[in-house]
Amino acid sequence: MLRREADGSHVLVTPYEKLSIAVDDAPFLAVECASSGSGEARTLTFRLLTDDIVVAGPDHPLRFAAAADGTPRPYLGVRGGMEALINRPVFYQLADWALAEAHDPIGLWSGGCYFAFAD
């Protein structure tokens, strides 16, 4: 099982050993998103590269950061303090939905929470 330690490091844990691993950015990758509803009733359901399904909301927040070069880096909270990087095609899909809804600040609702695209 993959776990994030209190110091922010990542480890793989088996019944017999605990191995430290290096994670460059995020340990998971979100590769698909489905949207149902609109506005405050919207639900965003993500599929990770591991085939896990995660619904954005209070327990699985969306976070938008900027890389060193200024490009957006969107993340989805997964579990235990770990996040999934949202891949570029999925981010563009989220941006299209957000632009169509035209909230100020720009963002999307999911699971009863509003997630603004800017920090």
Image (spheres, grey):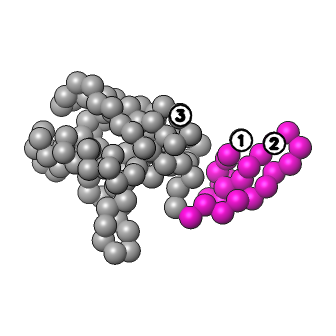
Disc 3 residue type (three-letter): Asp
Q: Nearer the viewer, residue 69 or 80?
A: 69
**Of the image marks 3 and 1, the number of the one nearer the N terminus:** 1
Residue at 37%, 59% (x, y): give it: 73
Based on the picture, tell me whether residue 3 belongs to the magenta stretch. Answer: yes
- 74 relative to 78 in the view: left or right: left
How many labels, in total?
3
Q: In the image, residue 118 lies at what x, y percent?
A: 26, 57
Q: In the image, residue 34 lies at what x, y percent?
A: 33, 32
> Which residue in the structure is indicated by mark 1?
1
Q: Tell whether label 2 touches label 3 (CB within 8 Å).
A: no
* Quadrant occupied by the C terminus: bottom left
**Of the image marks 3 and 2, the number of the one nearer the N terminus:** 2
- Quadrant in the picture for residue 58: top left
- 3 relative to 105 in the view: left or right: right
> Which residue in the structure is indicated by mark 3?
52
Disc 2 residue type (three-letter): Thr
| Magenta span of residues | 2-24
Disc 1 residue type (three-letter): Met
**Label 1's element?**
loop
- 101 relative to 50 in the view: left or right: left
Q: Nearer the viewer, residue 113 or 101?
A: 101
Identify the mark at residue 14; answer none if there is no mark: 2
